Image (cartoon, rainbow, N blue to C red):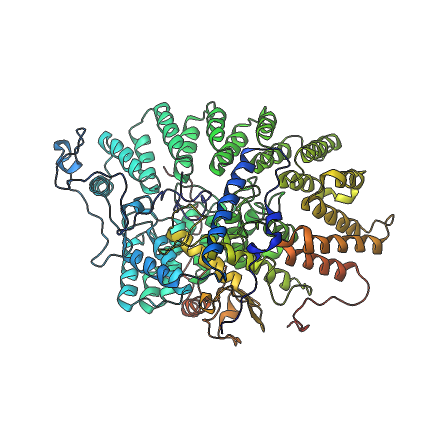
């Protein structure tokens, strides 16, 4: 697959599709010798510059200037197609042949947002069949599901059709191949919110969590659905979700997502305000301990201190929290040593009596 | 006699205990994670066999050759980045500045002229000559020009038109679309805030509502998603946080929750960072994620926190350096995501940026370094710890050794260049708000 597994964010398309970067000195795999001078390739492909129906149009070469930088060694086909794309753009031509060419330009670089924009202009100007366009974009997305432009294009077509009826199934198809595809989830949330398709989504999320309880995207979707439907303000819902989380934790105690979810839903109301929580978690400590459980306890104690729960002895709670922080820093979660030590110092500073602990490295003067 | 470097964390006895525990429940996530851990182990084993005294080395020369070549010529494998060419300029130029490699004057001028051709007549920069303006290449182009830092470079930017462009993509809810007729996500706010602040074109209305929109992207996990409702993700979290820092509103985030989220993204076995919970390590997150720690450190400090460390960021700096140096370098030059992946300029840029963050801790009066391996591994310092994102970049005394001045990870270019650019553009008046009422409805 792509050389950049997760990079869908900065920048526009990134190195996502740079499968193999073939430096000029490297061996180029799999490409047969190419005769650059041939007017046509095998299979009847004709360059646009040799097509009679295009003879009226003067191709526009790319203006890279006399001393180009980051100059890409475009293939002949790429240059040819884009020279003609630029010509169409220059003339603002709105024709069938222009529409057909955009598909080729997209095929060569699906991240070219200028081409996509132009295709959308043509879709409207030529009153193209949007159902056909849905088929087209579905195929492209299947092929390149980690590209921004393809999903945005699909969204535009769905908006124009005002018809989301294929969406949830299509997205589920894509997610069945990569259950964490960020674009797919984004599109899914947009569809659900725009067209009010909340029914059945919680069930879908549960299916995904059955398949992979570590699918953080699914946990996020769970939170999304509940937030926008029942909300967590109902005690029954909260209880159900807490029990669901604990159940998943017991299945896989080292699954961070489940712990984060439990904390995420309880924190707004205060961890220490939830009845019986400490006991449930302490019970888990026997056979289901993990750094996440310990971290959760720290959060719990911190909340106890914060809400100044007079039932609890503040000093004792602080000491317990500090002990856990040190255990995490020293032994159980050493990669986060600096963080846990900071947490300990913060707690001490805020709730401790006496001197402010100085972090190692002297100097107490802050301008 | 060479100084003995600290023992490598990844060769310690207890390192094995950091392997992923699947509790006997195998899923796609755990299977993928274990695969990566195995491949990392292989790399580490090979390394140990070859080197009796492990001294990770930054392959400066190799990276330099790779970058130097790429700045001029790229193979057809880069056709997929034909709409991101300013990015290629930025990734390469920033990598070179981190390595403290000079760019010949002729090349500097050529880059300026190329980026000028990428500038749209209606403002902003496009992915290539003749394409439409887009916030991402706009960000990249402005950063690249600021790295070049010549008068010619600054003069390429048409500030009036740039402002028009920003207004043309501004949405009523405070967000920005990436381009006219394009998608919204939190990257756009960062790109807009970055270029507007560097070139001094921020008007009173330009970022109206933006900080509130960004804040709504912080979710139940503590990190930020691309849009409200989405999963917390390193790239988007960086963009949102850095944008808020520029807007002076970072204190409105739940900083504690964000801190917990980002520190949890460092992988206990690999040492590098993942982009999202329960996903895989990737070298580029060395910057997007680790780069958040300096931002948070500063934000907490501003908030009056007296318990912050004075010598290190709140992540395992050594472990990250080990990951980058041992697992993310291509021996022929260039850096990468993880073992088995191909090198590319994006990863080269962000792995090196992350390496710099991991090597340097900076405070107003303190500077502390932790350079893994040889002295020559040290990179230009990326971050300092000023009292304000903008004005404190004017000349400031640092007890630096023989390093270039630090940089602000908000912009991810070296701080001298930030200071210089800001100094230059702040002498110019903010352009008049011509397009103040325009907002970009999708016009396609």
Residue A312 % position (x, y) = 86, 49
Q: Quadrant of the C terminus of chain A?
A: bottom right
Count up the numbered dots: 0
Q: Is residue A57 left or right of residue A251?
A: left
Q: Quadrant of the N terminus of chain A?
A: top left
Residue B197 % position (x, y) = 46, 61
Residue B350 % position (x, y) = 45, 55
Name the quadrant containing residue B6. Answer: bottom right
Residue occupying the point 52% across, 71% down:
B3
Depth order, front residue of A236/B65: B65
The answer to whether residue B284 shows anywhere in this view is: no
The answer to whether residue A94 shows anywhere in this view is: yes
Residue occupying the point 68% across, 50% down:
A332
Residue B113 % position (x, y) = 27, 60
Q: Is residue B323 left or right of residue B102?
A: right
Q: Is residue B217 left or right of residue A76?
A: right
Q: Is residue B273 above or below residue B380?
A: above
Q: Is residue A340 above or below residue B274?
A: below
């Amino acid at each position: 697959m792509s050389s950049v597994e997760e990079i869908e964010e900065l920048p526009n398309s990134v190195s996502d599709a740079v499968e193999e970067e073939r430096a000029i000195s490297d061996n180029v795999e799999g490409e047969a010798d190419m005769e650059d001078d041939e007017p046509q390739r095998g299979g009847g492909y004709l360059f646009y510059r040799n097509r009679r129906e295009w003879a009226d149009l003067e191709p526009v070469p790319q203006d890279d200037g006399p001393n180009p930088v980051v100059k890409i060694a475009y293939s002949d086909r790429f240059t040819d197609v884009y020279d003609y794309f630029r010509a169409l753009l220059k003339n603002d031509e709105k024709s069938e042949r222009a529409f057909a060419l955009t598909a080729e330009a997209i095929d060569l670089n699906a991240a070219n947002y200028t081409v996509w924009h132009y295709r959308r202009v043509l879709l409207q100007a030529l009153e193209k069949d949007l159902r056909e366009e849905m088929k087209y974009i579905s195929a492209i997305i299947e092929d390149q599901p980690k590209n921004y432009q393809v999903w945005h294009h699909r969204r535009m077509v769905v908006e124009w059709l005002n018809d989301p009826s294929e969406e949830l199934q299509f997205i589920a198809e894509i997610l069945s191949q990569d259950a964490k595809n960020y674009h797919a989830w984004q599109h899914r949330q947009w569809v659900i919110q725009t067209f009010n398709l909340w029914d059945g989504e919680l069930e879908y999320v549960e299916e995904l969590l059955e398949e992979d309880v570590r699918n953080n995207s699914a946990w996020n979707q769970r939170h999304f659905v509940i937030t926008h439907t029942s909300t967590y303000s109902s005690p029954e819902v909260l209880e159900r979700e807490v029990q669901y989380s604990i159940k998943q934790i017991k299945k896989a105690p080292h699954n961070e997502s489940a712990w984060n979810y439990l904390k995420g839903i309880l924190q707004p109301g205060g961890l220490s305000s939830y009845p019986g929580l400490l006991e449930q978690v302490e019970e888990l400590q026997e056979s289901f301990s993990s750094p996440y459980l310990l971290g959760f306890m720290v959060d719990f104690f911190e909340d106890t201190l914060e809400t100044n729960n007079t039932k609890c002895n503040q000093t004792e709670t602080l000491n317990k929290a500090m002990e856990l922080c040190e255990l995490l820093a020293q032994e159980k979660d050493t990669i986060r040593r600096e963080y846990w030590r900071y947490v300990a110092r913060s707690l001490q500073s805020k709730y401790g009596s006496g001197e402010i602990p100085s972090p190692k490295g002297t100097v107490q003067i802050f301008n | 006699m060479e100084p003995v470097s600290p023992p490598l964390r990844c060769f310690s006895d207890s390192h094995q205990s950091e392997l992923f525990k699947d509790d006997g429940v195998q899923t796609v996530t755990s299977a993928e994670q274990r695969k990566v851990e195995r491949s990392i182990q292989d790399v580490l084993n090979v390394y140990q066999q070859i080197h009796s005294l492990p001294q990770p080395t930054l392959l400066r020369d190799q990276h330099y050759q790779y970058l130097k070549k790429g700045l001029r010529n790229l193979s057809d494998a880069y056709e997929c980045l034909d709409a991101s060419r300013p990015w290629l300029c930025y990734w390469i130029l920033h990598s070179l500045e981190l390595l403290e490699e000079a760019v010949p004057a002729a090349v500097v001028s050529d880059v300026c002229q190329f980026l000028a051709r990428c500038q749209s007549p209606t403002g902003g920069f496009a992915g290539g000559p003749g394409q439409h303006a887009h916030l991402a290449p706009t960000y990249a182009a402005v950063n690249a020009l600021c790295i070049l830092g010549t008068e010619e470079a600054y003069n390429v930017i048409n500030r009036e038109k740039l402002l028009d462009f920003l207004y043309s993509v501004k949405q009523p809810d405070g967000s920005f679309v990436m381009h006219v007729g394009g998608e919204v996500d939190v990257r756009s706010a960062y790109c807009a805030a970055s270029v507007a602040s560097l070139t001094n074109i921020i008007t009173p209305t330009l970022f109206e509502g933006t900080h509130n929109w960004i804040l709504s992207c912080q979710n139940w996990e503590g990190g930020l998603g691309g849009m409200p409702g989405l999963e917390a993700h390193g790239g988007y979290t960086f963009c949102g946080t850095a944008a808020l820092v520029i807007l002076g509103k970072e204190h409105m985030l739940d900083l504690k929750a964000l801190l917990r989220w980002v520190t949890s993204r460092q992988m206990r076995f690999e040492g590098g960072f993942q982009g999202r919970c329960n996903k895989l390590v990737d070298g580029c997150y060395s910057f997007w994620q680790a780069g958040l720690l300096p931002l948070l450190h500063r934000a907490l400090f501003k908030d009056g926190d007296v318990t912050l460390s004075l010598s290190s960021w709140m992540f395992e700096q050594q472990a990250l350096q080990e990951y980058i140096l041992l697992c993310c370098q291509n021996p022929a030059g260039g850096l990468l995501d993880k073992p088995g992946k191909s090198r590319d300029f994006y990863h080269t840029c962000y792995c090196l940026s992350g390496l710099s963050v991991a090597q340097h801790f900076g405070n107003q009066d303190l500077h502390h370094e932790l350079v893994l391996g040889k002295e020559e591994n040290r990179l230009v310092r990326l971050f300092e710890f000023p009292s304000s994102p903008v004005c404190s970049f004017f000349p400031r005394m640092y007890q630096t050794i023989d390093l270039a001045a630090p940089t602000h990870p908000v912009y991810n270019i070296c701080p001298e260049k930030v200071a210089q650019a800001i100094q230059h553009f702040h002498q110019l008046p903010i352009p008049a708000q011509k397009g103040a009422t325009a907002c970009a409805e999708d016009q396609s």
